[in-house]
Amino acid sequence: MKQNQRWQMPLASFLLALAALAPLSGQAQTGQGYPTTATALTTSTTTIAPSATNAACTSQAFTANGLTGFAVMPSFQLSGTGVQNVTFNFAASTTGTGNWTTSPAPLSVSVPASGTNAVLAYVDCPPHTSGSGSANAPYWQLQSVTNANAGTSGTLTINSITIVTSNR
């Protein structure tokens, strides 16, 4: 009998802890957390020559939450050994249908290449909290991609670019 009593107290503590955690797991299942939306900006393979900017590599407009910003998830690789940055240039708009602020680009995201190894990055872009007009715009668009790798460092192949935004 005494041997069974040794397990009663730890078991009771475990059950109390489990009961305390139950509301947390229920909350996540009801969707009261902060769900996110992933938007594929490019899904087809795009190539960019060494030391070049591809202004044709653009996207549809997407909205960014003013409280949380957005994240960029590019997937790419080079045909050579280059390790210089690949830069993704975004423009902002207050309407989402035009008047894109492109010069200077309000947001550029740089990710280092890794030669012929595939790169999948996740870059957080916090919300713009200063400035006015387009600097705080709710709409964004990919305007161009720059391959800083020169010569035989390789042609850049973009496999996909995904934007992640919070629905908060």
Image (cartoon, helix red, strand yellow):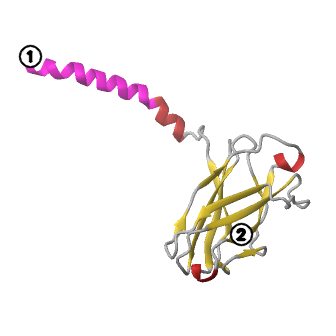
Q: Residue at x 64, y 67 (%)?
A: 86
In the rendering, which numbered label is found on residue 145? 2
Which residues make up the magenta segment? 2-22
Q: Seen from this angle, which residue lies furthest right?
A: 99
Q: Residue at x 36, y 25 (%)?
A: 17
Residue 141 x, y percent position in the rendering: 78, 61
Q: Main secondary structure of the magenta part?
A: helix
Helix, strand or loop under label 2 = strand
Q: Is residue 5 magenta?
A: yes
Is the C terminus in the top left, top right, bottom left or bottom right quadrant? top right
Few, some or many residues within 10 Å of mark 1 (<14, 14–19, 20+): few
Q: Residue furthest front?
A: 151
Q: Is residue 31 visible?
A: yes
Which is more N-terminal, label 1 or label 2? 1
Where residue 50 sits in the image (x, y, percent)? Answer: 66, 79
* Residue 49 sits in quarter: bottom right
x, y percentage for residue 32? 60, 37
Residue 35 sits above or below residue 83 on the image: above
Occupied quadrant, residue 109: bottom right
The numbered disc on residue 2 is 1
Helix or strand or loop: what does disc 1 sit on? helix
